[in-house]
Image (cartoon, helix red, strand yellow):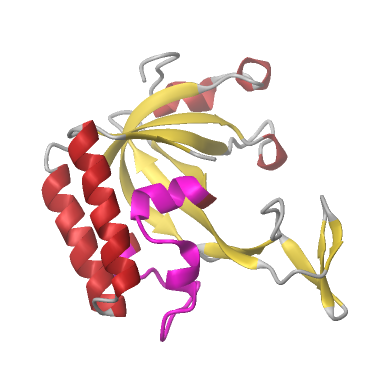
Amino acid sequence: MTKNRRTIAELLQLNMPDLEDIKYTCEGKLTAIDTTYGWWYKACYDCKGAVKAYGDTFWCARCGKNDWSPVPWYKLNVIVEDESISTNFIIFGKLAQNIIRVPTQQLAVANNSDKFLLPPIIKSIIGQTYIFEVSINSLKSNLDARSFKVSKFLSTGLDINGKYKEHQKDVQSIYGETDEITIACESQTVIHDEMGSNIMLQST
């Protein structure tokens, strides 16, 4: 993941025409997660767009009226810094789940869960360094501010084995050692063992 490599400062200085339909990569440390608007949102069952209450059902801007109940979906507003500056990246859905290794719904419905307070398992990714592939979030960007959406990430930490164990420990402390969590963790271990210390995951 070295194509179109930029520092964060260089990304922020690019003209809007240079950002349209182009993906860039940059390496940075995830230093914080902004939960002003929560770490998950109610998503359309079909397209995963945001929904609003519509009488006894729900309304999706893409799909229209939807009788299916919405699902919790990750939206992590992460603060990433490198040697030049810091900025915010947005990580959605399955890609965020690949980083955290726990589905949104399991965390969202856990006892004492609060969408504005980070669970320990999400906090554990803070301080980790990644190579991010990003593109401009045109709906949230203008001439004065840039918003970037993450489409891929590559973990660069040499201690990823130890970090994974911390993730698993956090999951068990939140939910207990249920069969479902154990199977999920064992599956992740197999994937990691097969792919080595650097894992590249792409959003779906």
Residue 116 lies in the magenta-colored region: yes
Locate the N terminus by quadrant.
Answer: top left
Q: Residue lying at the far bottom in this picture: please name it.
A: 112
Q: Is residue 118 left or right of residue 182?
A: right
Task: Say how many tags the image has.
Answer: 0
Q: Which residues are magenta?
A: 94-121
Residue 147 lies in the magenta-colored region: no
Note whether 120 is above or below 10 in the view shown.
below
Q: Quadrant of residue 18?
A: top right
Residue 12 shows up from this direction: yes
Residue at the image position 31 percent from the left and 78 percent from the top: 175
Residue at the image position 41 percent from the left and 19 percent from the top: 6
Residue 171 coordinates in the image, percent (x, y) = 27, 69
Q: Is residue 20 left or right of residue 3?
A: right
Residue 3 coordinates in the image, percent (x, y) = 42, 13
Note whether 199 is above or below 112 in the view shown.
above
Locate the C terminus by quadrant.
Answer: top right
Q: Quadrant of residue 122?
A: bottom left
Residue 38 coordinates in the image, percent (x, y) = 53, 66
Residue at the image position 40 percent from the left and 56 percent from the top: 33
Residue 35 shows up from this direction: no
Q: Quadrant of residue 20?
A: top right
Residue at the image position 49 percent from the left and 24 percent from the top: 11
